[in-house]
Image (cartoon, grey):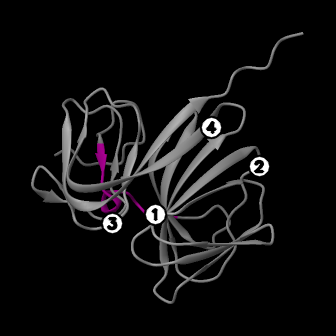
Amino acid sequence: MSVGPGAATGAPAIVSPGSVVAEPWANGLGITRVLARRLAWRLSLAEIRGRSVFSTFPDTDRLLVLAGDQQLTLAIDGAVHRLDPGDMVRFPGEARVIPTPTSAGALVVNLMTPRVLARGESRIAHVDGSLRIPADNVEPAVVLTTGLSLEGERLPVGTALLPGAAATRRLEGRGVVARFSIHPVPAPPTA
């Protein structure tokens, strides 16, 4: 199995969070691991260890999915959202977001797309046995729970399965995966 940071074209199709260097959030108040970065999107895994404030990203849309087995409360511009594992929330990068995890902390998968280039979507896949991911798959996916393996190797929470695999892959076991699709935004009409 090929494992690596997946930050450029031709990068490995599977990225384990342990293979990516943790870096501080843009505002320095948390830690993230960039699982993949392309022109129109960035996929990362953030650790939320306590109440803080998310970094702002003007002109960017964010889609956040809660990974692991802990709950998380987000106050997004004052509106409270209580998330259970696998729940998704979308918000503009300019929003003031205050996360409050349980005492154990929380892991979140974060898809960011520049608003003028793309829009991201997410759907949850519950695996009970196996999930086939074809070689021509163009959607990144991230393992949200324990209990899944690939080629006999257990995948940690936060493992990204990226487009570009040389062969069809099959996830096996019981667990949950977030599958992401990125859609280009049409160019505005010219005058």
| SS class, disc 2 | loop
Give the answer, above or below, for where 97 lies relative to 152.
below
Residue shown at 50%/47% (left/top)?
Answer: 122
- Going from the N terminus, do you reach mark 4 or mark 2 first? 2
As shown in the figure, which amino acid type bears the numbered disc 1?
Gly
- Going from the N terminus, do you reach mark 3 or mark 4 first? 4
Residue at the disc numbered 4: 119
As shown in the figure, which amino acid type bears the numbered disc 2?
Pro
Using the numbered discs, state the Cα–Cα distance from disc 3 to disc 4 in whole angstroms.
25 Å
Residue at the disc numbered 1: 86
Give the answer, above or below, for where 30 lies relative to 155.
below
**Of discs 2 and 3, which sits in the foreground?**
3
Residue at the disc numbered 3: 145
The reply to whether residue 155 is visible in this rendering is: no
As shown in the figure, which amino acid type bears the numbered disc 4?
Arg
Using the numbered discs, state the Cα–Cα distance from disc 2 to disc 3 in whole angstroms.
31 Å
Judged from this view, the residue extending furthest toward the right is 191
Badge 4 vs badge 2, beta-carbon distance below 8 Å: no
**Of discs 2 and 1, which sits in the foreground?**
1
Residue 136, image x, y percentages: 30, 26
